[in-house]
Amino acid sequence: MSNRQNASLYTLNFTLNTSPIITGANCITKKKFTETHHTAPMQTHTPIQRSQWLLALASGLLLVLAFPKLDQGWMAWFALVPLVLAIRHADPRAGFILGWVTGSVHYLGLMYWTAYTMNAYGNVPLVQSVLVLLLFVAVLAVYTALFPLIVCRLCRKPWQLALLAPAVWVLLEWLRTWLFTGFPWELLGYSQYDHLWLIQMADLFGVPGISALIVFTNVALALAILGWAEKRWQGHLVSRKLPLRTGIIAGVLLLAATGYGILRLHAIDKQAAAGDRARIAVVQGNIDQAIKWDATFQVMTAVKYRTLSLQAAEQGADLIVWPETATPFYMFHDKLLTDMVLQGVTDSQKDFIIGSPAARTDGDAFINYNRAYLLSSDGKIAGQYDKVHLVPFGEYVPFKRWLPFVDKLVAQVGDFKAGRRGDTLVWKERPLGMLICYEIIFPDLARASVRNGAQLLINITNDAWFGRTSAAYQHFSMAVLRSVENRRFLVRAANTGISGFIDPGGRVLATSELYEDDTLTAGISMMTTRTLYSRWGDWPLVGACFLLTALIAGAQWRLRSEDGPRQANKRRWFKGR
C-alpha cells in the first residue's frame, strides 16, 4: 500500500471519529451520538480491581461483627455499603464473584463452629471437617453472590437500585429458608434481636421485613456516598436529589418502625398481664456430650435430672421442662432407667416435659424419633411430640452415596423419622407448641403450632454439640424473633445452655450460663392473640417483592428487545453515511 493510500485511510478514520455528521439541521459528533443513544452499557468482563476486592472483604467482616457472639448489630446498617460501592460499575459476572467473596467471609466467620462440632463430637478428622466447612460456606455464599448478580443485571439506574435491592434480598433469604430443606440460620434481620423497639415489626412482616429495612438503609447510604463524590452507578450519574429522597424515606421508615414498636409493646404487655398464668421451670442438666451416651454415666444423668427437678418443684413450678434427649436412653424401653425417671416425676407431684429418643419397630425396620413426652404428675404419658424438621448430617444423612464418611456424625443415635407438622402437647387444656433443637430457626413451624392453638412456645435443645463457640448464642438469638412474630412467651431448656424465658415482646426475662447445672423458674402467661404474621407468614412480603422484581425485570427485557433493532438500524445508518 502506498504512502498516499495510508494517508487517505488515516484522514478518513480521523474524519469519522471527530468531524460533525450532518443530519438535517442538527450537527453532532460521533462521540456525542454514542453517549446520547447508547442506552445500555456494553457487558464486557472488565477485570476486578484491588479496591473492589477490599470492599467486598470489608462487607463480609462487618456482617460477621453484626451477629452473636460479637453482637455489634448496629454495624448491619452499613455492612453492605462497601459491597454496593464495589459493584457500582461491575457487570453481573463480576458482581457474582464479589458477592461470593462477601458471603464466604461472612459465613466463614459465622459458621466456623461446624468444623469444631464435626471434629470434636462426630469423630470426623480435622482436615475433612475443615473441608466440609469450606464446602458448606461456599454453598451458603452463593445466596449472597446472587444478590449483586441480580442487582447488576436489573438495576441499570440508581433509582432502580434503591427500589429493587431490598426486594431481591428478601427473595434470596426466603429461598434459603426452604431450598434443600432450608437453612435460615442468622438471616440479616436477626442481627437486631436485641433492639427491642425495632423488632416489633416482626409480627407484621417477620424477619424478612427487618432485613428489607436494613438493606434499604444500606443502599440509601451507598447512594449518598456516590452522590456526594459525583460517582456513577452502572454508568449513570447519581443525582443529588436521589440520595436525599432515599435518605428521607429510610428515616421515615425507621421512625415508623420505632413508633410501631413502642405502641405495640405497650399493647402486648397489657394482654400478657391479663392472660392465664402458670409457673414453669426449666432444668439444665449440663451433661457433657462426650459422656452423654456412655452407658456407665446413664444412671448419673437420671439422678442429676431428678435432683434438679425436685429443686424446681420446691420453687413452685407447675410444669418442669427437660432439654432435648435429656434421657440418654429410650424411655419406656429401658425399664430400670425409665423407672428412675418416673419415680422422680411422682415424687415431685408435678407435670413434666421430657426430651428423649424413642423408637418403634416396623417389620424388620427399627424407626427412631426425637421425641418430647408430656408426663402427668402420676407418671403417665399425657402426650408426645416428634421432631418434624430433622438436622441434615445430624439426625439423618442426605446424599449418603456421595458423602460416605459423614455417617460418623450420626453414628451415636442413628437416622430419625420426622413427626407431624403443627402437632401440639395439650397441658391442662392449654395447647403447647413444641420446637425441638433447631426447629426454632424455622418460622413456619412456630406458626403452624400457633395456628393449631398453641398458647405457649417451648424449645428444648441440646447445644452441647456447639461447645463454647458462638453457635449457642446465635441459636438463642433467633428464638427471640419467634416470640415476637407470634406474640407468645417462649420457654427454652438446653442441656448445657443457654436456657431461659422470653416474653411476647422479645424481652429476655432470664437466662442460664453455659456449662452450669441450673434450674430457672418464671411465671408466664398463656396468649391467644393471632398476629398478621401468624396468619400469613412471609407470603405478603415475598409476594410483593416477587411482583416488584418481575415488573422491573420485564421492563428491562422489553427495553433490551426494543433497543436491539433500534441500535442495529442506527449503526447501519451511520455506516451508510
Image (tube, grey):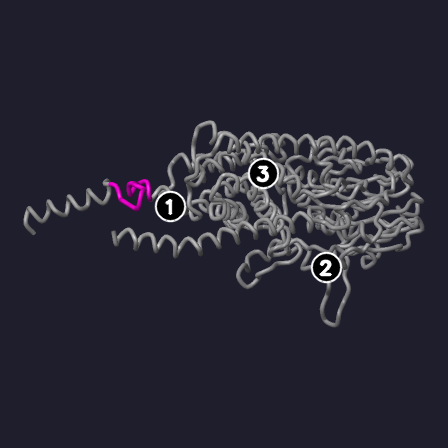
Asked whether 349 falls inside the magenta stretch, the response is no
Q: Is residue 125 left or right of residue 236?
A: right
Front-most of residues 71 and 196 = 196
Q: Quadrant of residue 458?
A: top right
Examine the rendering and report whether any part of residue 496 can be seen: no
Residue that appears at 87% across and 53% down? 339
Residue 14: percent from left, percent from top: 19, 42
Mark 3 vs 2, N-terminal side: 3
Q: Which residues are magenta?
A: 20-33
Label 3 is placed on what type of residue? Val
Label 1 is placed on what type of residue? His
Label 3 close to label 2 by CB (< 8 Å): no
Above or below: residue 72 compared with residue 14: above
Q: Secondary structure at mark 3?
A: helix
Residue that appears at 37% across and 46% down? 38
Residue furthest to the front in view is 25
Of tags 2 and 1, the one toward the viewer is: 1
Q: Is residue 173 left or right of residue 477?
A: left
Q: Which residue is mark 3?
A: 215
* Real-space Cα separation, disc 1 to disc 3, in angstroms: 33 Å
Residue that appears at 89% across and 38% down? 279
Residue 429: percent from left, percent from top: 92, 50
Q: Which residue is mark 2?
A: 418
Front-most of residues 546 and 128 = 546
Examine the rendering and report whether any part of residue 526 can be seen: yes
Of tags 1 and 3, the one toward the viewer is: 1
Above or below: residue 563 compared with residue 203: below
Asked whether 28 falls inside the magenta stretch, the response is yes
Mark 1 vs 3, N-terminal side: 1
